[in-house]
Image (cartoon, grey):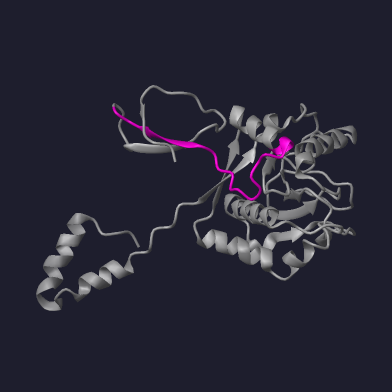
Amino acid sequence: MQPPTRREFLAAAGAFAATAGTGWLFRLVAAQPAARAAPAAAAAICKEAWGAAPVGAGFVAHAVERITVHHTAAMLADNRDAPRRLRGHQRFHRNAGWPDLAYHFVIDAHGHVYEGRPVAYRGDTFTEYDPTGHLLVACEGHFDRQPLPAAQLASLTDVLAWGVERFGVGVDTIGGHRDYTSTTCPGAAVRPLLADGTIGAGVEQRLRAGGVELAPFCGPAAADLVAAIEAGSDEPGAALTPARFLLRHSNTPGTADQEIPFGRAGWVPVAGSFGEGS
């Protein structure tokens, strides 16, 4: 139900005030749906920032219909190794004849999200299932041999919530690699969280709270973050959000203020007066 216009409000007041008192007003206000909360901000470190190599040929376009969780099946004892490990995964996958890293997103132990293969293209797998239509989200680590850190689980939940809303798929389409073929992936520490609904409940909670906006995090600031991760000076579990500024329109029609993620692809400086960043 749309909120009443001023004309509708006054017409309703004239028609009902005399006979219904003010009770109708409170009923009318109560009938208006609550505004949806703003989505939580999250960010994926751009490929150029983590040092990805050029991609090859052979991408296959697809439409996302479900979301599938993987692990990389390589022990991650020190999160400082995560960017280097990611570069190694991409090199290994390219040497296997694939055009790029197999996964669309990878999440490290500290909860940093890395951009992988473009989501418009099908991922790849060494196992016997067709990943067409699957958004592939991988957790860096070997979760048959190590626990899943809380920061990694939190970011996994964010990415899954973003994917559900972005592609209009149900929470019930979230599964693990093992659901489609004979494998232990995504590992003994992750599979039960999918099977018992823990991850699904977390995703639903994110969506009820306003969803998640996953924005690319690029440029020098992203490169600095990768350097900090490799140096061990990043903040484990800290929410990574792209810097923002408010663009105040002084001589243009339309909205007076517009919030724009800094560093988003295609971002260019503009002339004007800027408000405080948030």
| Quadrant location, the N terminus | bottom left
The quadrant in which residue 57 appears is top right
On screen, residue 111 above or below 95: below
- Asked if one can make out residue 119 in the rendered structure from this viewpoint, the answer is no
The x and y percentages for residue 67 are 70, 54
On screen, residue 156 above or below 11: above
Magenta segment: 229-250
Q: Residue at x 24, y 71 (%)?
A: 26
The x and y percentages for residue 44 are 63, 41
Tell me how many marks there are: 0
Give whichever of 188, 276 is nearer the camera.
276
Determine whether, in the image, residue 171 is placed left or right of residue 180: left
Q: Please identify the dominant SS of the magenta region.
A: loop
The x and y percentages for residue 259 are 42, 39
Q: Residue at x 68, y 31 (%)?
A: 49
Q: Residue at x 79, y 62 (%)?
A: 189
Give whichever of 271, 111 is nearer the camera.
111
Give whichever of 107, 115 is nearer the camera.
107
The x and y percentages for residue 173 are 69, 60
| Quadrant location, the C terminus | top left
- Residue 235 magenta-highlighted: yes
